[in-house]
Image (cartoon, rainbow, N blue to C red):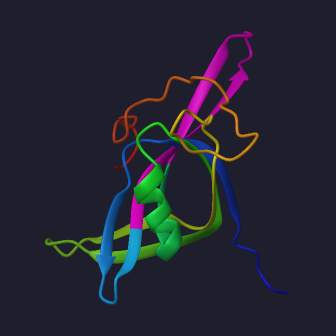
Amino acid sequence: MRGVNRVMLIGNLGKDPDVQFLEGNIGVAKFPLATTETFKDRTGKLVSQTEWHTVVLWRGLAELAQKYLHKGSLVYIEGRLRTRSWEDKEGNKKFATEVIGDNLIMLDKRQDGGHGGPGSESFGNQEIPPFGEHSPDLPF
């Protein structure tokens, strides 16, 4: 049986896309994306849990990200997971799991000169912790 590697995320950019152009003028954009889920705990208190994802877009999607996306933009990303590994300066093996985006839909409300598709709407303002601030019990 064949496997399925598919990811669908709706979230806000943690910072402006970092866009670089490789040999042959191939664009690649990378940015952190925050997804927040809200639920009630056993006591009935509302709890928000935010996950951070690293999104990578290639070619035309990278150029769209450079032109239209910015910190806080609400987007729908569809793609697949990819894990890469490397050795740091001390010889320790490091890993990074990224979402390679195949599809991007901008969900911000359209403004005067803004972007977003017809019928796009915002899901409200959610409190998002700063990118890079992790729980002290996490290994990174």
Camera-nearest residue between 63 and 35: 63
Query: Where is residue 48 shown, x and y percent of the image?
Result: 60, 25
Q: Residue at x 39, y 74 (%)?
A: 27
Camera-nearest residue between 132 and 33: 33
The secondary structure that most of the magenta stretch takes on is strand
Question: Which stretch appears magenta?
Answer: 29-52
Say if 75 sits above or below 127 in the image: below
Camera-nearest residue between 81 and 121: 121
In which image quadrant can residue 134 be found?
A: top left
Q: Residue at x 61, y 37 (%)?
A: 110
In which image quadrant can residue 138 be found?
A: top left
Quarter of the image that includes the N terminus: bottom right
Say if 131 sits above or below 22 in the image: above
Say if 40 sits above or below 23 in the image: above
Residue 50 part of the magenta segment:
yes
Would you say residue 97 is visible in this rendering?
no
Query: Where is residue 26 shown, x and y percent of the image?
Result: 39, 81
Query: Where is residue 116 shown, x and y percent of the image?
Result: 62, 45
In which image quadrant can residue 109 be found?
A: top right
Name the outermost residue toward the right.
1
Camera-nearest residue between 57 and 49: 57
Name the outermost residue toward the bottom.
24
Name the outermost residue toward the left.
89
Residue 58 part of the magenta segment:
no
